Image (tube, rainbow, N blue to C red):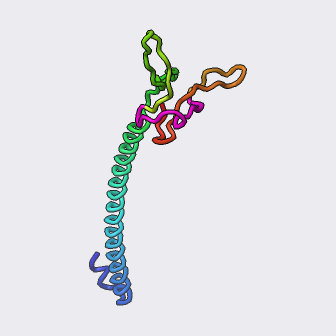
Amino acid sequence: MENELDGLPSEYDAMIDRLSNQIEELFSEIHYYQALVTEKENQIIRLTTENNQLKMKIRSLNEQVNPTSYPSQKSYTPPKQPYSTTTTSGGFKSVMKRQCPQCGAMGFAIKEVDDKTNIISYVPRRIYAKKMVCTKCRNEF
C-alpha cells in the first residue's frame, strides 16, 4: 500500500496533510467540549443537591411556623375573671370595676369588644364572644 501512496502527486500529499491537521483540530475540540460537558454536568448535580437541601430547610422552617396538627375546633373559654371582687362582712361578693391583669388599669381604660375569632351563634345573626382590651397597655384578656 505504501507503494501506491508514493506515486501520488504532491497536491494529494498537501491535501492529506491539511485534512489530517483538521482531523486533529476537530479531535482536540471534541475533547475540549467533552470536558465542558462533564464540568456542566457536575455543576448541575451540585446545584440540584443544593436546591434539594434548601427545599428541605424551607419545609422544616415552615413546619416550625405552621404546625400541621390543628385543633379540631376551638372551644370558647370565658375570660379569667376580668373583674376585681371583694367580700363584704355579710359574706356577699360585690363586683367592682374591671381590671387589667397586666398593668392593673381599671374603669374606663378597659373596653369590651367583640371577639371575631369566637362565634357563639349564627342564628338569628352572628353573635360573637366578648373580650376585654386595655387601652393603656393593649392587652387582650
Q: Does the magenta stretch include residue 109?
A: yes
Most extreme residue toward the right, as rendered? 124
Left or right: where 42 falls relative to 90: left
The residue nearer to you, when weighing 82 against 8, is 82
Asked which quadrant contains residue 120, the reply is: top right
- Residue pictured at 36% horizontal, 55% vertical: 47
Residue shown at the point (72%, 20%) measured from the top left = 124
Q: Which residue is drawn at 35% across and 81% down?
A: 16
Residue 8 is situated, as x and y percent measured from the top left of the image, at: 35, 85
Q: Residue 56: x and y, percent?
A: 37, 43
Q: Is 1 located above or below residue 102 in the figure?
A: below
Q: Is residue 116 visible?
A: no
Left or right of 75 in this view: 44: left
Residue 100: image location, x then y, percent: 45, 33
Q: Is residue 57 visible?
A: yes
Point 34% across, 49% down: residue: 49
What span is colored magenta in the figure?
A: 101-117
Depth order, front residue of 76/20: 76
**Location of residue 18 (image quadrant):** bottom left
**Closer to the camera, 9 or 71?**
71
Task: Give percent across and percent down for residue 103.
Answer: 41, 37
The residue sitting at the front extreme is 89
* Vertical comparison of 16 with 53: above or below: below
Q: In which quarter of the image is the N terminus?
A: bottom left
73 relative to 18, above or below: above
